Every structure is written in C-alpha cells, then in structure tokens.
Amino acid sequence: MNEQPPDKDKLLEAIINSPSYRRADEDLEFLSRDELRAIRLQLELLKPEMAQIQEGIHSTIVVFGSARLVEPAEARACLVHAEAALAQKPADPDRRQAVAIGRRHLALSPFCEQAREFGRIVSSSCQVDGRCEYVIVTGGGPGIMEAANRGAADVGAKSMGFNIALPHEQHPNPYITPNLCFQFRYFAIRKMHFLLRAKALVAFPGGFGTMDELFEALTLIQTGTVTGLTVVLMGRAFWDRLINWPMLIEEGLISPKDAQIFRYAETAQEAWDIISANHQPSKPA
C-alpha cells in the first residue's frame, strides 16, 4: 500500500498558525492570561506616563463627578418627558420615581455648567506660552467629566481622560485631547495616574465612583502618603447631606484636623481661588 507523502505546505501552515509560534508581544490571548497580570499592570502604568511626558504634561487638576448629570436644558427636557409619561399612568411607582429623580437631576444640573466653567478658567489661566500646567484630567466619561473636558476645549487647551474598561459599553467623551485619552483595565493603576501629577482634586456630586476616588485621596492625605494636594468639594449642601463629618469626629473615628483636609466651594471661580492660593504653576525655564 502506497502512502501519500505529507504535504509540506500544509504542515508548515499548521506550524505558522499555531498559537505557540505567535510572537509573545503580538499574542493577545497569551498576554491576557492570569500569569501575565504583572506585565499588564506595568504596561498600563507605563503607556500613559510616557504619553504625558511626550506631551509635556507637568501638573494636573483632577475633576470627579457623576456621569449621570447633564446640563440644565437637557435635564429639563428629561423631566418634561418623565412627567408626560407619569401623566399617562399616574399610579406607576417607577414613573413616579423617574419624575422624582428628574427633579433632583434638574436641581443638580448647574454643577455641569460650573464644571465646564472650571475647565475654562483653569485651562486659560495655566496653559499659556506652551506650558502644560494644571491640565484638567477626568474619568473621561459623560456628565460632569465631559463638562470639565469641554471647558478646556472651549479655550483650545489640552485635557485628559482616563476611561476604564467596564462590562457594559463605554465611550470617551469627545472633548478630550485625542493624544491624552487613555483606556485602563485596572482601577488601581487608573487611580494612581489620577494622583501622580495632581496638584488639586475637585469633587462634584457623584455616586460610588466619585466616593471611591475621593475617599482614597482623603485617606492618602490623612496618612501623609500624599502631600501638597488641595481637595475641593463642590456644593456644600450636597456633601453635608451625604456625609456626616461631625459624627465621625464625635465618635473619634477621625480627628478634627482631618476635616480640614478639604475645602468647600460653590462656584468654579471660588474653587480656582482656593487652589491658586495654595499653588502657583511653575514658569517655563
């Protein structure tokens, strides 16, 4: 019985197409293995760092806040839509809740205007003569984040966005400087980058994400791990309703001086006045 000789071309093709033959730096499946987590963490730290060095970013101001808030005109339109839906089914509890939330979002919507104004004020004051000082950086999403990035874009300045990969689809807002928009896999590395160049952190009303980022920064300042960071909370009524700071002091869980780690502001200009009183952007050599 005569056997057919092996087809060398097919054998070679099988080898070339084998995952083992794929170069390690081009093998995404390999790079996604659990054993490669340390390498991914290092790459995620290095890529944004190298890009910021290339773009000449010396210092930043971080703006946190809800992705769900919108500017007043859009908030008003959403409320009108919710009220119309409720009018059709007045007893529907979900529609009642939608109207209640719509009213709260309308009340909070001016913070989007303040975030945009803050981005304009800081960027026009600090990004002059080719300097990249106090560059606005956000989480890169919609809402308060988009407003702050948009404020920088209004005056032709750079701003950054640190997006995070989530189970549901997410896109960066369109006002981030393209060369300074990054997507992160790991929350920890993303939060590290928020603070690496930060001179100030401005926290607008927000949810879990805002709380997480704010309290990590407060903890780092309280423990002396981070120094020279000015923290401004926008809208004292919101924060006093959300967090009972006096109770923490009364219970001995924080000290009175810990409550001095942050300041309150009601307007973009007031926030910038607090920050600029503590810091002066360095001048070019």
Image: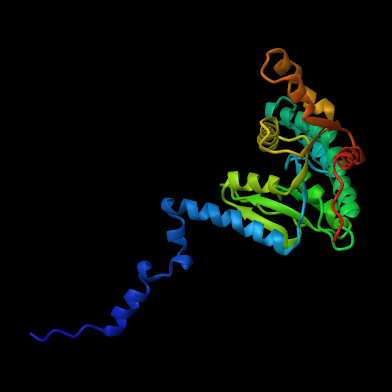
Q: Quadrant of the N terminus?
A: bottom left
The image quarter containing residue 109 is: top right
At horizontal 87% and vertical 43% (from top left) the residue drawn is 113
The colour scheme used to paint the residues is: rainbow
Q: Position of residue 225 (x, y in %)?
A: 66, 36
Q: Position of residue 25 (x, y in %)?
A: 48, 66
Residue 143 visible in image: no
As drawn, the residue found furthest toward the left would be 1
Q: State the count of labels.
A: 0
Q: Position of residue 15 (x, y in %)?
A: 33, 75
Residue 130 visible in image: yes
At horizontal 77% and vertical 31% (from top left) the residue drawn is 99
Q: Position of residue 78 (x, y in %)?
A: 80, 40
Q: Is residue 256 left or right of residue 119?
A: left
The image quarter containing residue 133 is: bottom right
- Does 130 appear above or below 125? below
